[in-house]
Amino acid sequence: MTADSSKNERYNARAAETKWQKAWDERGIYATKNDDPRPKYYVLEMFPYPSGRIHMGHVRNYTMGDVVARFKRAMGNAVLHPMGWDAFGMPAENAAIDRKVHPKEWTYANIAAMKKQLQSMGLSLDWAREVATCDPSYYKHQQKMFLDFTAAGLVKREYRKVNWDPVDNTVLANEQVIDGRGWRSGALVEQRDLYQWVFKISDYAEELLEALDTLDRWPEKVRLMQKNWIGRSEGALVRFMLDAATVPQNLEGQAETELEIFTTRPDTLFGAKFMAIAPDHPLATAAAARDPKLAAFIEECKHLGTSQEAIDTAEKMGFDTGIRAIHPFDSSWKLPFYVANFILMDYGTGAIFGCPAHDQRDLDFVNKYGLGNTPVVCPPNQDPKTFVITDTAYDGDGRMINSRFLDGMTIAEAKEEVVGRLEKATLGNRPVAQRQVNYRLRDWGISRQRYWGCPIPIIHCDKCGVVPVPASDLPVKLPDDVTFDRPGNPLDRHPTWKNVKCPACDGPARRETDTMDTFVDSSWYFARFTDPWNETAPTTPKIANEWMPVDQYIGGIEHAILHLLYSRFFTRAMKKTGHIGMDEPFAGLFTQGMVVHETYRDKAGNWVEPANVTIEGMGESRSAKLTATGEPIEIGSIEKMSKSKKNTVDPDDIIEAYGADTARWFMLSDSPPERDVIWSEEGVQASWRFLQRLWRLIGEVAGVTAPADRPASFGAQALTVRKAAHRALANVSDDIAKLRFNRCVAHIYEFANALSDAIGSAETAPSPDFAWALREAGDILVRLFHPMMPHLAEECWAALGHGTMVATEAWPQIEPELLIETTITLPVQVNGKKRGEVTVARDAGETEIKAAVLALDEVKKALDGKSPKKVIVVPQRIVNVVA
RNA sequence: GCCCCUGUGGCGGAAUUGGUAGACGCGCCUGACUCAAAAUCAGGUACCGCAAGGUGUGCUGGUUCGAGUCCGGCCAGGGGCACCA
């Protein structure tokens, strides 16, 4: 079968789609006014990176958003449905390096190409609000916000250990390192020390965590992932005195006299066997200065890889400093003090006390160094006298043992007791312990050593230090004349760009040459869409506050942490700096599944593109061959569409062959939207066949002559059609509102089948009431599938003789009385097994139903003359006879 | 290792949230139309069985008049986090 549309009675998708897209555009029906008085609805799909071509994932994403937008418009909302471009980033620079084309040129050419593709999908977007993050008219506001955030204390500059991507030659945030590799390049990440501009997202750790509970229209999964990422743990900071006799005498200045550690298990303090600090802990650095062996050990730790494999296989290693720490509850109890490779400097205080019996890492450590262990928590039903730990630490519940005044307490009681006592105890006028909450969430380092990003509006002056660019000098524009012939940052080696006068002292100074992480760009674009025409400020708060938050945000699960967490932080920062009035940017979030496809390989094992493969046979006898040569092709597993496995299908090809409506319909059918959808040729053809069927069906309805006025009463035939129509209307409305598009599709099929049957049963001249009902059903059907297949819907709407556009039509009104049946068929079970059914009046009483049930032959047979023990009647549902 | 999700025909998936398991689509089978093919239309399609009937939602136990749905224990697949004290 081909998508040949030359047959005269067939719907010509290509011609119709171009025609209606032009008509919508000319009338500007998708442009949204900010002063629209109707209830607002903001639906947004994650904006694309302008890679050059849209892919099927985009088609799925934007189709879902468009269905929601069109539905809400029909429901009478003022709908904001904008589109833009996440246009800064590495690929543009790679193109510059590989193809000698300027990143700007490459990016804008891609935007133009992709915009055309998106327009061919018939999306109801307000293109007047289009923004590109690489445009100075966008990023100048971002620079202003950087200055505002700095003034508000949300930004800091620090020399810190960073994740360095050796392929992209730039820094990555923690969130951008996946399994020890760069999220984009896939290269093993190295550690480097660099000056970084940092957004203090961790100031909001508690708030970002707590507010997750209020996001009741977000997937549970995403909230959980963010919760784990923020990683809150409650514990205590405890100060240990150091045994002065063991702290070397020859320290410069005052010797350290104490060590502060963080613990979540203060209850296990009597099981302590050692202290340990991170290799890069200041105390370790100080101690290494006078101990070459320790210095060598620390050096060794640094060279241990930071990759996942290295961490998994690395042995616990420690170096005994010779220092002894004093137990906070017993001044005669001295604990050995190690520098250990498994302690992280950037969590807690970079120091711990080790309780080997109840922590696996600590146990591995003592077993290696022969320090022993003392269990202090005894599991329930275990005799404390015989409870020993050998090589598996016990981290479960139980009662305290071997712990002096804690013995017999639960863990919770012991924690409270220990912290309570240590809070009251003092060392040098300060309490020994204080309660503290720690987070796994790190601050967000945004400096990137790249050209194609938003310049950080900062000037470095030898005299004045770090000086912000005055707001009046914004934007700091990227220079166009840059070279990509060498690795590294083109801004840094630009001959003149970085040389400026210091805004403070007028002396010679240098621009910051780092640019911002592109995730900054995407952390506020949703707010910019509310008033992209404002040239003086990022937002017009009054307008932004009317549209925001986004009512329905749709995008991939891969952004569950990165983009969504950054945006939540950014919105709070914008609130603090007066750019917006709310904390949360996205009231509703939907994460769609991927588009997957079969993979194909030739005899040599090379991947082959679906476009070059011909599938033969159906079902089990399916086989594949190379279209050009007939060489047999092996059909492989179904996987995410990717360039590397060449299992991609180009949306352009599909739209060319079948039209956008077919592609849209297929994207919504079958698979629930949150799950992966398998793209298959059979599936597309099924969609295309159905599209043609709808066209024929509406053609038949259009041929029915009906009275203009609604008949006073309806006969049985008419009622059947009307019930089917209004039931479909109720179902589809409910399903779109809940984003259950696969069920919408099924209900539209059902309705089309019912209407088809009704037309088939009609006489050549159907009675006026039936004819009226058929026309009504046709009108409803077209409006129901309009959000999914808007072009076909316009064509059908016109064929039905309406002079309006279906895109501006209101959603049909449900007549609820048509959903209520007068009689009802109840299944009848005997002992939970279905044996028959009874049809009774809808309002039949229990005794009436029981009598009908007991009169059934199947029931009589099953009861075998005996009377039932019990008859359970569930109104409107089922009857169960217990024999 | 820790946390989470999923498991239903040949396939994608429905199931009013404890009430007729398999809606709808794909695929397949039969028939009509056709010289033929495509398209279209009509009918069938969970499994075993000629039938009566029986079995059936990963496995296993339980709660219930009634379990795909709830509870316990396994198994399998997928995802997130991971030397975070």
Image: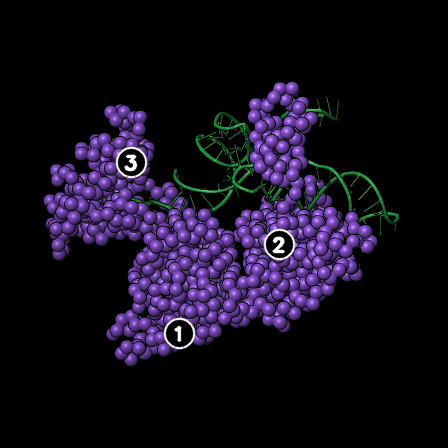
Determine the chain carrying the residue at label 1.
A
Circle 3: residue type: His
Residue occupying image coordinates x 65% and y 49%: A818
Circle 1: residue type: Val
Q: Which residue is mark 2?
A: A814
- Both labels 1 and 2 in a single chain: yes
Q: Position of residue A76 (x, y in %)?
A: 56, 62
Label 3: how many Cα within 10 Å (few below 14, some 14–19, many 20+): many
| Quadrant including the C terminus of chain A | top right
Residue A513 seen in the figure: no
Give the foreground label among 1 and 2.
Answer: 2
- Tell me the element at label 1: loop
Horizontal side, residue A882 vs residue B32: left or right = left
In the figure, what tint was chain A given?
purple
Q: Position of residue A717 (x, y in %)?
A: 74, 48
Determine the chain carrying the residue at label 2.
A
Q: Position of residue B3 (x, y in %)?
A: 41, 41
**Cα distance, mark 1 to mark 2?**
56 Å
Q: Which residue is mark 3?
A: A358
Residue occupying image coordinates x 37% and y 42%: A313
Image disc number at residue A207: none
Residue occupying image coordinates x 66% and y 33%: A837
Q: Residue furthest top?
A: A865
Determine the chain carrying the residue at label 3.
A
Q: Which residue is mark 1?
A: A476
- Both labels 3 and 2 in a single chain: yes
